[in-house]
Image (spheres, grey):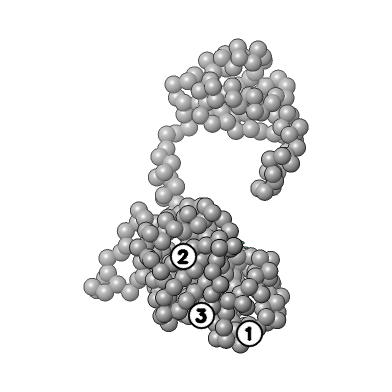
């Protein structure tokens, strides 16, 4: 591949020019806009974008296959656009790379207590003395959050290992990749319900469930989640959704239900505890990793 930086003599419509690039053989187009210094907020709706900003683009980077010469590409572009003063600012040969392999290399198996969290392409280690104390967990890194690399997930996984005795019914609210449900099932929970707003995450969680050959986990969107009384509730979300969920968690718990809340920063813990104490929980312990923490309590 060859990466070519192009400059137009004046601002051009990104959409129109990008279509020319692609029709002339480019594999990818990157747009540079000197007037916009930050990315648009992730959740801005397309119709709310100020499209006038995009007319000011003059500089583009295109990725060309190695058999397309940048000079020929420029000539074709001049002929299509009728602009003769388009300049090549620079061109760089991009080394051929196996991107799938590169992405895979970014993931390593992670051991959290007894849990051995690995991707499908990693092998589970051979037991050293005929007995393997490790619990195997396969997580395909996909659209769902939760591969074991984030501190909050690790805090939750450590707490689950301390808390699960066997036979419990567990709710994992904000289940992401399904990693906490999968751990809970492997550690002996009788039934695990994962609730998640994001459909791509639910698909990833379902895939992970089947990779681990587990049948006692179900994933739901919030509106479809059953009314149930749980022995253990775990939620690794963020401070504000956790505040909003206090009443709901109180309704699906009984006296003695254990609760763990994470995804919060250390200085948010006290306010969250107060919110949950108002609906019947008492907090006992705080686990911390870096700036993140997990608070744990019981319904009284
Ligand atoms: C930090 S991730 C946690 C994923 C996984 N449980 C873990 O511990 O790694 C939080 C997840 O909560 C989901 N989420 C956020 N707000 C939610 C809500 N109100 N109801 C259900 N899920 C929610 C997000 O889509 C995301 O997948």
Badge 1 is on which residue? Answer: 282
Separation of marks 1 and 2 at Cα, in angstroms: 28 Å
Number of the label disc, if any, that sits on residue 231: 3
Query: Disc 2 on helix, strand or loop?
Result: strand
Quarter holding residue 124: bottom left
The percent coordinates of residue 64 (x first, y second) are 50, 26
Which residue: 65% across, 18% down? 86
Q: Are marks 1 and 2 in contact (CB under 8 Å)?
A: no
Q: Is mark 1 within 8 Å of ligand 1?
A: no
- Tell me, yes or no, whether the two marked residues, 1 and 3, touch with CB atoms within 8 Å: no
Circle 2 is placed at which residue position? 218
x 44%, y 67%: residue: 217
Give the mark nearest the N terminus, 1 or 3. Answer: 3
The reply to whether discs 3 and 2 touch (Cβ–Cβ < 8 Å) is no
Indicate which label's residue lies in the foreground, 1 or 2.
2
Q: Is residue 219 above or below residue 42?
A: below
Which quadrant of the frame does ligand 1 lie within?
Answer: bottom right
Could you tell me residue 157's position as x and y percent?
A: 48, 71
**Residue 246 in sight in this render:** yes
Q: Residues within 10 Å of mark 1 (few under 14, many from 20)?
A: some
Task: Please report whichever mark, 3 or 2, sits nearer to the chain's N-terminal start.
Answer: 2
Find the distance from the CA under tag 1 to the CA under tag 3.
Answer: 15 Å
Label 3 environment density (alpha carbons within 10 Å; few <14, some 14–19, many ≥20):
many
Is residue 254 left or right of 120 when viewed as pictured?
right
* Disc number placed over residue 67 in the picture, else none: none
């Amino acid at each position: 591949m060859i990466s070519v930086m192009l400059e137009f003599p004046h601002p051009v419509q990104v959409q129109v020019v990008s279509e020319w690039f692609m029709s002339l053989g480019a594999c990818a187009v990157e747009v540079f806009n000197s007037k916009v210094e930050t990315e648009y907020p992730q959740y801005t709706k397309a119709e709310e974008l100020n499209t006038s900003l995009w007319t000011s683009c003059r500089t583009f980077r295109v990725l060309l296959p190695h058999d397309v010469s940048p000079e020929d590409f420029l000539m074709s572009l001049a002929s299509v656009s009728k602009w003769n003063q388009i300049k090549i600012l620079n061109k760089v040969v991009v080394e051929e790379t196996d991107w799938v392999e590169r992405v895979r290399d970014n993931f390593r198996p992670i051991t959290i207590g007894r849990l051995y969290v690995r991707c499908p392409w990693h092998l589970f280690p051979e037991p050293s003395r005929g007995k393997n104390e490790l619990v195997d967990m396969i997580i395909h890194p996909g659209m769902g959050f939760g591969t074991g690399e984030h501190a909050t997930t690790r805090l939750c996984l450590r707490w689950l290992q301390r808390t699960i005795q066997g036979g419990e019914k567990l709710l994992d609210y904000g289940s992401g990749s399904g990693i906490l449900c999968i751990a809970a099932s492997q550690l002996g929970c009788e039934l695990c319900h994962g609730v998640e707003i994001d459909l791509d995450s639910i698909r990833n969680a379902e895939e992970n469930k089947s990779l681990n050959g587990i049948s006692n986990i179900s994933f739901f969107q919030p509106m479809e989640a059953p009314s149930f009384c749980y022995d253990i509730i775990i939620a690794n979300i963020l401070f504000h959704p956790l505040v909003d969920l206090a009443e709901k968690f109180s309704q699906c718990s009984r006296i003695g239900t254990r609760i763990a809340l994470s995804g919060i920063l250390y200085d948010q813990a006290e306010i969250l505890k107060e919110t949950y104490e108002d609906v019947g929980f008492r907090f006992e312990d705080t686990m911390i990793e870096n700036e993140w923490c997990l608070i744990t309590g019981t319904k009284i």
